[in-house]
Image (cartoon, rainbow, N blue to C red):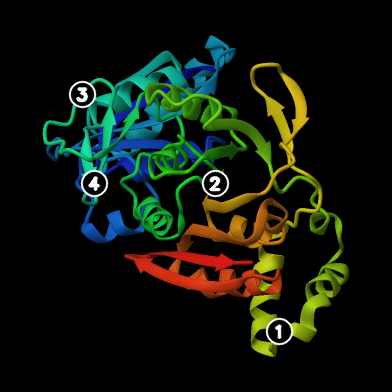
């Protein structure tokens, strides 16, 4: 998609005030770029999965917003005028930098795809896994290493984040040679590809973002994996949002439907978790085949393992749906769960017939593993 990027060159000291002013003008979510290093605590709290190379601290900052490509010049000039006046007013009590404003036309996807490459380097993940971009070989590979090649990362997932590492550890523990894996929320396909390298006979990756599916397919191709071993499709397992259509009293009655099998404490946690997410899935997955441009349904099959590295608010309603995609005795591996939501996830798992097998924490993130 083509955008007009409206960028204000200012200072680190003024960047937040400039962003707030843009929000007051009706442009929320400004992008701030500076070279101030993040603290270790800030890094732990961030849900990012791209290794960043520090470039040295400076006082200069850029605050950007993205405008529709058809935004007319008169409106842009008016925006420039308003921003310039505000910067001049701010300058009376703090440094605001050059105040230079630029407007450039950019393809958001293409810009990201090129820019991330300069920051991404090959690295070792555990004892025998190497994540390697196709443009740079890892110099310290050892015999027996499992090498995941990356050519595109247009979606979350490069293997560096703690949530991904947790999933990899659980796949190592539970995946047996020849088993099938369903990767729900596949992102860039890292876990799906690694599942094949760990011995899976067949892997299906699913994501609601078409760009993620394209990225996953490119990465699978870079690893020489064919469609009989790995496939990716676009769809939403949470299509058919019945809870979202209920009033509050109906939601409460729905949440209480399993009270007989849960303690009062568990029931309270489940109600909080399920109502907080506001969604529950009862319909089959709705798929779009990117090659054909047609609606389709997921292949009618079950899997030995389902893995979901998403967030607690998605995993909770997914726990009602995933049993339809698991063989008897199958394993549901989840991650992307903050420590304070782990119990909500465990309660939802039990509510939907799972037995919680394992809970592992790494930093601020938790993986919950359950079986049927």
In primary-sequence order, the first of circles 2 and 3 is 3
State yes or no: discs 4 and 3 in contact (Cβ < 8 Å). no
Q: Which residue is label 4 attached to?
A: 128
Query: Residue at horizontal 33%, vertical 64%?
Result: 362
What residue does disc 1 label? 262
Mark 4 or mark 3: whose residue is earlier in sequence:
4
- N-terminal of the pair, mark 4 or mark 2, is 4
Name the foreground residue: 6 vs 45. 45
In the picture shown, does residue 114 fall above or below 194?
above
Q: Which residue is mark 3?
A: 136
Q: Position of residue 118 (x, y in %)?
A: 23, 25
Q: Which residue is denoted by mark 2 in the rendering? A: 181
**Front residue of 282 and 101:** 282
**Residue 6 spot, x, y in % from top left:** 42, 22
Q: Look at 47% across and 27% down and name the residue there.
A: 215
Q: Nearer the viewer, mark 4 or mark 1?
A: 4
Tell me the SS state at disc 3.
loop
Which mark is first along the chain, 3 or 1? 3
Q: Secondary structure at mark 2?
A: strand
225 relative to 69 in the view: left or right: left
């Amino acid at each position: 998609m083509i955008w007009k990027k409206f960028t204000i060159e200012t200072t680190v000291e003024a960047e937040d005030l400039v962003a707030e002013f843009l929000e007051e003008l009706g442009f929320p979510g400004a992008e701030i770029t500076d070279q101030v290093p993040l603290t270790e605590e800030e890094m732990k709290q961030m849900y990012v999965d791209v290794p960043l190379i520090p470039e040295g601290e400076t006082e200069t900052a850029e605050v950007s917003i993205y405008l529709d490509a058809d935004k007319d010049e008169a409106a842009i000039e008016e925006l420039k005028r308003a921003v310039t006046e505000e910067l001049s007013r701010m300058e009376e009590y703090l440094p605001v930098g050059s105040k230079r404003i630029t407007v450039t036309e950019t393809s958001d996807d293409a810009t990201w795809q090129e820019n991330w490459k300069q920051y991404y380097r090959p690295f070792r993940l555990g004892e025998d896994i190497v994540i390697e971009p196709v443009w740079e070989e890892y110099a310290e590979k050892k015999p027996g290493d499992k090498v995941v090649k990356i050519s595109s990362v247009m979606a979350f997932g490069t293997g560096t984040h703690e949530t991904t590492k947790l999933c990899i550890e659980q796949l190592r523990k539970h995946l047996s040679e020849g088993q099938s894996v369903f990767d729900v929320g596949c992102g860039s396909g890292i876990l799906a590809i690694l599942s094949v390298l760990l011995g899976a006979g067949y892997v299906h990756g699913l994501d609601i973002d078409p760009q993620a599916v394209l990225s996953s397919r490119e990465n699978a191709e870079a690893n020489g994996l064919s469609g009989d071993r790995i496939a990716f499709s676009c769809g939403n397992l949470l299509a058919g949002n019945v809870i979202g259509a209920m009033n509050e009293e109906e939601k409460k009655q729905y949440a209480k439907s399993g009270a007989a099998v849960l303690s009062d404490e568990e029931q309270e946690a489940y109600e909080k978790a399920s109502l907080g997410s506001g969604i529950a899935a009862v319909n089959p997955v709705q798929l779009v085949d990117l090659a054909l441009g047609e609606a389709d349904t997921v292949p009618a099959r079950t899997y030995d393992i389902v893995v979901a590295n998403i967030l607690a608010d998605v995993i909770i309603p997914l726990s009602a749906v995933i049993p339809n995609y698991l063989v008897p005795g199958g394993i549901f591996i989840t991650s992307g769960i903050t420590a304070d939501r782990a119990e909500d996830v465990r309660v939802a798992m039990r509510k939907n017939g799972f037995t919680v097998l394992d809970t592992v924490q790494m930093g601020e993130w938790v993986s919950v593993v359950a079986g049927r």
